Amino acid sequence: MSFRAAWSLTLRKRGLGMRGIHSPGSTAHGKEKMPPYTNYHAQRSYPMPEEPFCTELNAEQQALKEKEKGSWTQLSHAEKVALYRLQFHETFAEMNRRSNEWKTVMGCVFFFFGFTGLLIWWQRVYVFPKKPITLTDEWKAQQLQRILDMKGNPVQGLASRWDYERKEWKK
């Protein structure tokens, strides 16, 4: 009997085996969340999260929560703000505040533009071959003179615009 078959029989005798411990929707050992993680998610379009921002309260925060159950007129402004901060991470003004992320994005864009420019310069200097002789001004002048001497396209082309008697362009 192979090892796989023996292992399969062992798992069947024990019950569900290792795969039956957890399901995709929950944690491995139960339905409760792991301590540092919560379902807190607040944004401008959905400002009321399912859970409070702070789930684990210290003694001072628990005393403030007990005081919250009484009359709110007895609470000071600082205590009201502290209670708000226990429930929510940010106010609407803080959520709508502009960030400085655009500076980072533009810095990265300009950095990559500069890097690309340096790469192109390096390729032109060290990688690409020198200009061919046909792109020099002397060669172009000689080529134009050759076309004019051969009287190429005398009806509508270059030869039609050249005055052969005065050896200059027609005006």
Image (tube, grey):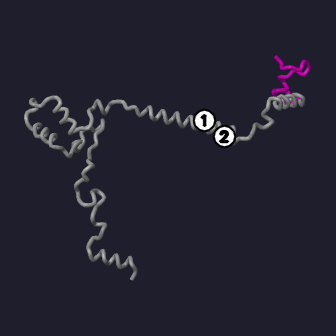
The residue depicted at 39 percent of the width and 78 percent of the height is 3
| Majority secondary structure of magenta residues | loop
Against 66, residue 33 (above or below) is below
Residue segment shown in magenta: 151-171
Against 44, residue 23 (above or below) is below
The one nearer the camera, 57 or 153, is 57
Residue 117, disc? 1
The residue depicted at 26 percent of the width and 49 percent of the height is 36
Q: CA distance from mark 2 to mark 1?
A: 10 Å
Q: Which quadrant of the figure has residue 151?
A: top right
Against 53, residue 103 (above or below) is above
Among numbered discs 2 and 1, the one appearing first in the sequence: 1
Where residue 49 sits in the image (x, y, percent)?
24, 42
Where residue 120 sits in the image (x, y, percent)?
63, 38
In the orientation shown, which residue stands out farthest toward the front?
Answer: 59
Mark 2 crowdedness (10 Å alpha carbons): few <14, some 14-19, many ≥20? few
The residue depicted at 25 percent of the width and 61 percent of the height is 29
Where residue 73 sits in the image (x, y, percent)?
9, 29
- The answer to whether marks 2 and 1 mark residues whose Cβ atoms lie closer than 8 Å is no
Where residue 13 sits in the image (x, y, percent)?
27, 77
The amino acid marked with disc number 2 is Gln
The one nearer the camera, 45 or 96, is 96
Q: Identify the residue under disc 2.
A: 123
Magenta run includes residue 124: no
The residue depicted at 83 percent of the width and 32 percent of the height is 139
The amino acid marked with disc number 1 is Gly
